[in-house]
Amino acid sequence: MNNGTGEGPRTRRKNKRGGVARRVARRRARRAGDRVELTRVAWITVAGLILLILAPTLALPLGPDSSMFFVSAQKVLHEGAVHYRDIVDVKPPLVYHLYAAAMFLLGESVIAVRIVDLLLQLATCALIAGLIRRIGASDAWAAAGAVLYALLYGSLGYAYTMQVESWFGLVLVATAWLALVRRTRIAFVAAGALSGVALMLKFPLAVLLGSVVLGEWLVAAAEPRAALRNSALAFAGFLGVLLPFVLYLVLGNAVDGFFAVGEFITGYARTKPRGPVALASELLGSLPVRTVAALGLVVVVAIIGALVLTVRDAGRATRGSGAPTPLTQWMLLSLGLLTASLVVEGKYYAYQMSRLYAPAAIAAGFAIVGVVSYLWRESRSAFVRIGSVAVAIVAVIFSPIPGWLWFTVAPATTLLARGEAAYDAYFDRMALYYPRSELKRVGAAIDAARVPDDRVLALSSIGALVHYHSGSIPDHRVYHSAFLLAEFAPQEWRDEFRTYALERHPRFIVVQRGDVLTELTGNDRSSDALVAILGIDSLLATGYEPLLETKRFVVYRRMSGSQ
Amino acid sequence: MRLRSGGFAGAFVAGWEFVRGGVRWTYIGEMLVSTVSGSHQKLEHVAVESRVIPSLARSRSTWLGIALLALLLLPAALFPPGGDAALYYVSGQKILHQGAAHYRDIVDVKPPLIYHLYAAAAAIFGSTVWSFRLLDYLLQLVTALGIGALVGRYSSRRRGFVAALVYVIFYCAQSFNGTAITESYVGLLAIPMIALQLRRRNALDFIVIGALAGLLFLLKYSLATPLAAAIAAELLLFAEPLALRLRNAALAIGGFLVSAAMLPLYLAITDGWAGFGEMNAFIAGYMRNQSPGLAAAVQEALTALPSYFADEYSLTLLAASVAGVLLALRSTRVVGERDRETQLLGLATINAALMIVGVVIEQKYRAFHLSRLLPYAAILSSAGLAWIVSRVRAQRPLGRYGRLALMLALPVALALSPLSRYALHGAGALLWVTRGDAGFDRLYPSTALGYSFVDLRTIGEHIRGSRAPGDELYVSGSVAGLVHAFADDVPASRIYHSAFLIAPYAPPMWREEIRRFILERQPRFVVVQLRDSMEEMTGTRLSSEGALRSLPGVDSLLQWEYDTAVTTTDFELYERRRR
């Protein structure tokens, strides 16, 4: 396949050996002004910059979702829990086991998972740079794409990192490598298998298989027979991953739990407004605004620019007067499919949008480098120079950089410079419905009063965080109140939870107030409503006493003698 | 044909030539420019040259283009009155019927020009709410044609038409609430400024440029940024000797000062200084209320601006505008001789940038505040669109991927352009005309607006039906202008927007004035708006009703002397008992 430069791997190897030829080529390229080849020192600088951007994420605490994964992974490690059978949550099993693996390897702490996350993000950046260098043949683009990805990820902050989407970028770029660079039969099977891995991270992410298949027909422009074969091989690889999943469900005795979660997801999907008007309002209103909020105005505009340039270059290539840009074509195709998956999901939080980050960084990097080189070429007059500086300032202001500074650098430096109290105060301001300092007080109160084997039951939308801060691992399987509050949740979950409370009499019951999650539950009840719904009010009244009451939480402790 | 008459006569003659022979599209701009600058010779040149190009087809396409623009602009003429526009309309009525002067007899934050524009509309077209819509329609059509002529002159007729089209679509996409306001007339004054700076560049032109900026200042203080843009452009974009460019800048400042001096003159003649001082005290308090600190202001700008550009401005127009800005940042190959089209784009870029800075300083990010960008957006985006289309067209055939990408991207681009808002608000105008208030309310629910047109109509009809000559109406509401307009009433008091009553930083004499007006004059009708919290403006959550009742003596007066005549979801109408 043409890699866009007319330069095959063999030539590249030759150049590597021939240092003089490389230096001459680099000098020529520099003189031409449109290709910047980075030196080893420059690459080390870029790598250092990426590390600098991503390293502060190590200081971030767990968020509501990542705490679910964390506590579930503890269950996997300590109780041999199986997802769907012993853990109720909507995601497929992979993320819980990834967390478990990280904790198994590096210890049972947040930093262990953060380190693994950092390594995976660095690997994603490296793969992005490698892929662009290989196909796009531009060092500047490669560096821009990798740095942009790091900035996008770094701008997510504590609650939206270490999500399933966070690792999708790595899967996507690896798939692109297999489908665009390797292109052997095994590569297509592996690309399909990686799409299966994406499915195991989150079901809608399986659209990656669509990128592989459509990419064959539209981007690679392979012969129909070859495209058909490659698509079939990718399907085979995809199915190859589904088989272990089915085995997991059957051997783990988790089929019923899987269908119960399926029932919950179906009910949840029904709460979303439907019909053409709702869809149109979502597509025209929410989607552009949320996309800009998640990616940054500059990245979105750059993606549109990349689309224009890619369509132009596709035409040039057809007429044989220029090189095609298969990488941007493939990434724009993926962006389209992933955006469709977002619309199907109907949720546009920044972490859900983060599935777009890797293809967005690659496509936007392409356009940004183009604009920078254009402005560089044109910067001969004072107006253009001043205008370029102004454009650069505006670009930085509306890039992911302010988000990175605010959501990641600020807490990390606060922790380093001003200690844990200031760090907690920072997150108190950030979190909308659970001040971190309150949560820590709840955890500390339980931790101080509990003895080993004391159970904690949390009626809370951040039940996992309550468990994490109190140092307890739930031995029940529902620890997010949305699965109890939503009317469309299977009744068996509520019955099971109630039975657990009434029969096991956990030593501590934590009730959260004011955590209305209408988007998840379809109603405006908060977790404290569960006390009445589940019929455990009399239990609390007769057998428990308040241990701690904060603005958002009440911690009940079982009275001695009451068992 | 010899032109010996004055500027407007010259314009008439050139216009006649245009009708007869088919003047080039691009000459419309020259006509406008020449009219403004009073250069007769130029008009003669236009008129004569127009006869030299008797292209019938071109003339026909020009007329078709103008007709299409006029047709597409129709929603602007058919919109119902918006909240701010109704306030200007009512003030215009006061000027026309009571000989009122701004600041002395009218309390509102804007400088005087907009109220007098509305008064002129009523004087020309009659005292109905359609008067200002009609004038606005004509002025916007002139603006669109001006933009078309300007762009057409320096690039191509087709691009000029696209720019005018973008302007018209984008303008109507501002909805009934965002049109016929101060920001709506930026293009009308700023386009001739650009034309003069690019084309003529004599001393008088720069004085006129400054004077036009002064008029923008008299529309809204923060709209004066085109003066700064003109000076910056003079220093950065033009290659004449520095001394000459400095002279030009000085002349523009001079023109501005002359124009802006009309404000103190107006205040002196109308005895409006005291009212002006009161309003400045209010604005100072308002600015303090608006400034919750630098960090919060920065955070708001970082959130609100991207949100506006992604939504109301639209991603399609944004991408095209960015392409236009990049085209403006081109260096010429020959030193000292810049490409005029690039200069036009450069001027539009500088103007747009300074307008955004103005909005950031104002810290108000509603779509209608940012509608001041419209004329520049039209110029930049038309250039960007043309560049994108030409680049893609030049590469045909596009191949399988390119065709598919284009097939998918085109409808998405159209959907994510101002066209979708144009369709929505255009439908609103159509509903208003064909199905009346109820039809319109269905499209714009009162939960979003804070009032419904059915309610306004009910209240207005009750007042009109039961009032006797000399009966007065007092309205305490954020849309008091609309209530007065629907009741065909010209307010007797000078304060009729409840923000001036609610805001804690409003001069205390205003509250006292309202209190005395109600207690002493005991107007026959009092209308209160019930749930119109304007925290952004007033800094409190107090509603108009709460604010009015909090005035000493007013609550008991309403209780003992008035009956509740009409109650709707958002309003209550009290009627004084007959004595």
Image (cartoon, helix red, strand yellow):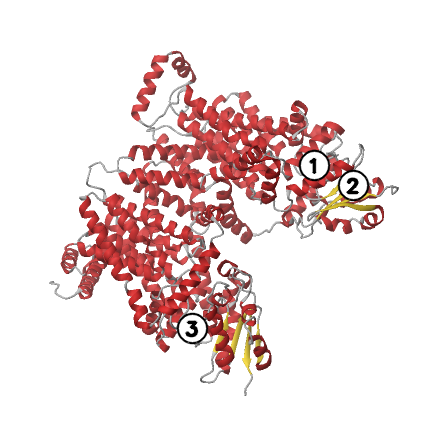
Report the residue marked by disc 2.
Answer: A508
Q: Nearer the viewer, residue B410 or B318?
A: B318
Give the spatial CA distance, label 2 vs label 3.
65 Å
Instruction: Tell me the number on the disc at residue B339.
Output: none
Q: Amino acid at mark 3?
A: Arg
Q: Residues within 10 Å of mark 1 (few under 14, many from 20)?
A: some
Q: Are marks 1 and 2 in contact (CB under 8 Å)?
A: no
Q: Residues within 10 Å of mark 3 (few under 14, many from 20)?
A: many
- Point 31% across, 53% down: residue: B226
Q: Are marks 3 and 1 in contact (CB under 8 Å)?
A: no
Element at label 3: loop
Residue A340 image point, x, y percent: 53, 41
- On the image, which quarter does residue A395 sit in? top left
**Left or right, residue B95 beside residue A495:** left
Give the spatial CA distance, label 3 vs label 1.
62 Å
Q: Amino acid at mark 2?
A: Phe
Report the residue marked by disc 3.
Answer: B494
Q: Amino acid at mark 1?
A: His
Report the residue marked by disc 1.
Answer: A469
**Left or right, residue B74 beside residue B573:** left
Q: Is residue B26 visible?
A: no
- Point 44% across, 66% down: residue: B80
Give the spatial CA distance, label 1 vs label 2.
13 Å
